[in-house]
């Protein structure tokens, strides 16, 4: 895996912290919560997308694609947090409640589970690969 430089690592960690703060602040119904979460998600996802794997291991390549899917889900969660602030899509009230209201929690949960799974599996696969050589 391509390692991030020091500045990229800082952006990655600050993004992760801002995502946690934004999600927690949303539970407290702070108006700035979607902005905090969106900035964190952009930083976190963009830095994770910069980490590339250019080796021959197919399993790691597949896990990286799953990890990129979780990054997209983090960004979708940010958009849904903004949509949760009000009916920005001009949908009917029932439709808005069915398809938008608090659905950011579902996408965030799926993204977090995928992120945990792929991070754990990639580290194990990289250890196996290092032992071969």
Image (tube, rainbow, N blue to C red):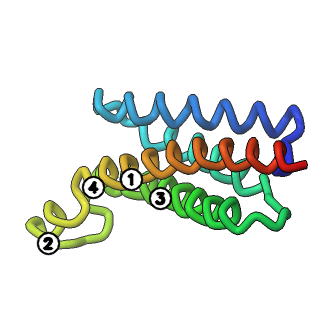
Of discs 3 and 2, which sits in the foreground? 3
Residue at 61 percent across and 60 percent down: it is 63
Q: CA distance from mark 4 to mark 3?
A: 12 Å
Report the residue marked by disc 4. 103
Q: CA distance from mark 1 to mark 4?
A: 11 Å
Report the residue marked by disc 3. 73
Query: Counting residues from the N terminus, which is met first, the one under dot 3 or under dot 2?
Result: 3
For label 2, count other residues whose C-alpha is less than 10 Å away and answer few (under 14), some (14-19) or many (20+).
few
Residues tagged 2 and 1 counted as in contact (Cβ below 8 A): no
Q: CA distance from mark 4 to mark 2?
A: 16 Å
Estimate the x, y position of residue 61 in percent, counting from the top left. 70, 65
Q: CA distance from mark 2 to mark 1?
A: 27 Å
Is disc 2 placed on a helix, strand or loop? loop
Residues tagged 1 and 3 counted as in contact (Cβ below 8 A): yes
Q: Can you see residue 91?
A: yes
Estimate the x, y position of residue 121 in percent, counting from the top left. 59, 47
Which circle marks residue 92 in the picture? Answer: 2
Query: Counting residues from the N terminus, which is met first, the one under dot 1 or under dot 4?
Result: 4
């Amino acid at each position: 895996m391509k390692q991030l430089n020091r500045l990229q690592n800082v952006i990655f960690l600050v993004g992760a912290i801002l995502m946690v703060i934004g999600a927690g602040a949303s539970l407290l119904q702070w108006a700035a919560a979607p902005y905090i979460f969106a900035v964190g998600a952009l930083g976190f996802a963009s830095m994770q997308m910069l980490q590339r794997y250019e080796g021959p291991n197919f399993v790691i390549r597949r896990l990286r694609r799953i990890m990129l899917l979780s990054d997209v889900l983090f960004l979708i969660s940010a958009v849904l947090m903004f949509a949760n602030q009000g009916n920005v899509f001009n949908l009917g009230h029932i439709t808005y409640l069915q398809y938008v209201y608090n659905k950011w929690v579902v996408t965030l949960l799926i993204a977090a589970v995928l992120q945990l799974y792929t991070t754990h599996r990639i580290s194990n696969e990289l250890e196996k690969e290092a032992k071969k050589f």
